Image (spheres, rainbow, N blue to C red):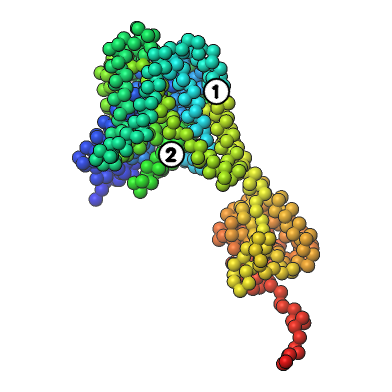
Amino acid sequence: MASPQNSKIHRQWPWLSGYNTSAFSNDVIAAIIVTVLLVPQCLAYALLAGLPPEVGIYASVFPLIAYAAFGSSRYLSVGPTAVISLMTAAAIATLPEGTRIVGAAVLALLSGILLMIFGLLKGGFIMNFISRSVVNAYISGAALLIMISQVKHILGISAEGTTAFSMLKSLGSGIGNLNQMALAVGSICILLFWLSRKYLAYGFFKLGMKSRRAKTAARLIPIVIIAGAIAISYAFKLPEQFGLKIVGDIPTGLPRLSMPMMDFETMQLLILPALVLGLVAFVDSMSTAQTLAARSRDRIDADKEMLGMGASNIIAGLSGGYPVNGSMSRSVVNYSAGARTPISGIIVAAFMAISAIFLTPILKYLPLATLAALIIAACISLFDFKSMWQTWKYSKGDGLTAIITFLSVLIFGVQWGVLIGVILAMTLHIRTTLRPNMALVGRFPGTDHYRDSKRFNVETYEQVKTLRIDESLYYANARYLEDKIARVAMENPKMTDLVLMCPAVNRIDASALESLSTINSRLKSAGIDLHFSELHTHIKERLIKSDLMEDLTGEIFFTQQEAMDSLEPEPDWSQFSDHVDIH
């Protein structure tokens, strides 16, 4: 019998149950492959964030261990990513240059604390308020913004800015200082990265390699390209001969865990960016984790995921790193390479620590143009204009929200773009519920099916009308219901009974209940009885306890057919003659 202590451990880390040497060997193999990808990516994304390359390494060690302890996904690979790096760059751009490294650590710490608070308060439901169309639009906008931000390294010039227009203006001003060697190296690397991503897996497959192994092998080719760029840069002395900018000396070793210190006034400037960044990190990571969990028939706990992201960012701030989240590309590789548990992330952290101690001197001659090319090639796959087009075709409101989000990211930057998108999506939802669909319905002859009388040829009666309500009733749409019923009563002077058909009503708040009482009184004064049908059990139980039931002029029917059986008028037999024609 398992001890209570073991039961508690297995509840926290269910993947430990049955963990064996076979699973460990799979995790080790996956960790090696992910590490090969992570080393150049963490340097590139630190560059994107406007930080020294070693900061990217620091953000790739302890956060992985923290996520393994608190997160819920078996496959999520946590660390620096393109979108979060760009948001970090925008957040710290307003800080004095000498405080930006500390500012990035404080940003991670604040994001982590906010996420931990939300997680402890079971705030994983926040995921439900950010629509998929907004997420796709902001990722596409951020991808384009990231690509524009890296053009300066491809051209070998200096440029600033946090929005598309400011970056393009700065690039235009500096184009006269173009470095032809940087342009050549960057262009060739972009082409090689793109070709390897697009066609290499298929090439390996045609050569007889299994599909899964072909994809994994193709994803490792970028490290070969980077190694080649370092070798050529060093052998031909490109920095000295042609002024090619390189990564330069990277401090070896890992930093000590310490609290990043910053004055309170400056820290206040980072609170809003930290909140937005934390939510984006959570939503992005949650989406990736759920996708991979679905493939393995696993499930993700949103609250634990929020705790995992919070813990990862807190430790990233304390270890001299910057904000992190789950990487889609590395997580997919981790899954495809055979990882079985979060132990693979802990092994990656160990390999990254070893890299920080022993391998950083090798990276000195890595051209910045190559890192920029790696980022640009990665961002090409993030564009999802097809999704925006599909959204527009299905719903003009959602499509317009997506387009405005995309443009807002380019015009105002990632942080404000995300906020604008979320606010627009929630506004659209609220606007839809303010004027819910309410249709007068009738019955298909000879059946118990009821449909909109304006759309279908159905049976209706002048004395009995049925209004189907297709939305929950709450304070924002209660007055609309009153107006709608008043219009129905005015347009149907012979009406004696009104049935509110409520199959889609999942909630009736206090304001809506008062409106129903008002409606009941008004209809009573007009000689009309108010009835309900198809109420959900929990709604019916609450209505029975309310004062409305004491004054209700009609009844509550279980089904709409039951209501019509009770209320439909008798046929007017006088219109039928008893004379029988025998011709």
Under tag 2, what secondary structure?
helix
Residue at which label 2 appears? 286
| Residue at (54% x, 15% y) in the render | 172
Q: Is residue 352 above or below residue 395?
A: above
Quarter of the figure with the C terminus: bottom right
Q: Residue shown at 48%/37% (left/top)?
A: 384
**Mark 1: amino acid:** Thr
> Residue 100, which numbered label?
none
275 shown above or below 305: above
In the image, is 484 to the left or to the right of 330? Answer: right
Residue 511, given in percent of the width and then of the height, sits at 67, 50
Q: Which residue extends farthest bottom?
A: 582
Q: Earlier in the sequence, mark 1 or mark 2?
A: 1
Gap in angstroms between the C-alphas marked 1 and 2 = 27 Å
Residue at coordinates 24% horizontally, 40% vertically from top-left?
208
**Residue most toward the left?**
21
Left or right, 231 with respect to 155, comes to left
Q: Is residue 137 depicted above or below 507 in this figure?
A: above
| Residue 222 appears left or right of 463 | left
Query: On the image, which quarter does residue 461 sit in?
Result: bottom right
Q: Amino acid at mark 2?
A: Met
Identify the mark at residue 163; answer none if there is no mark. 1
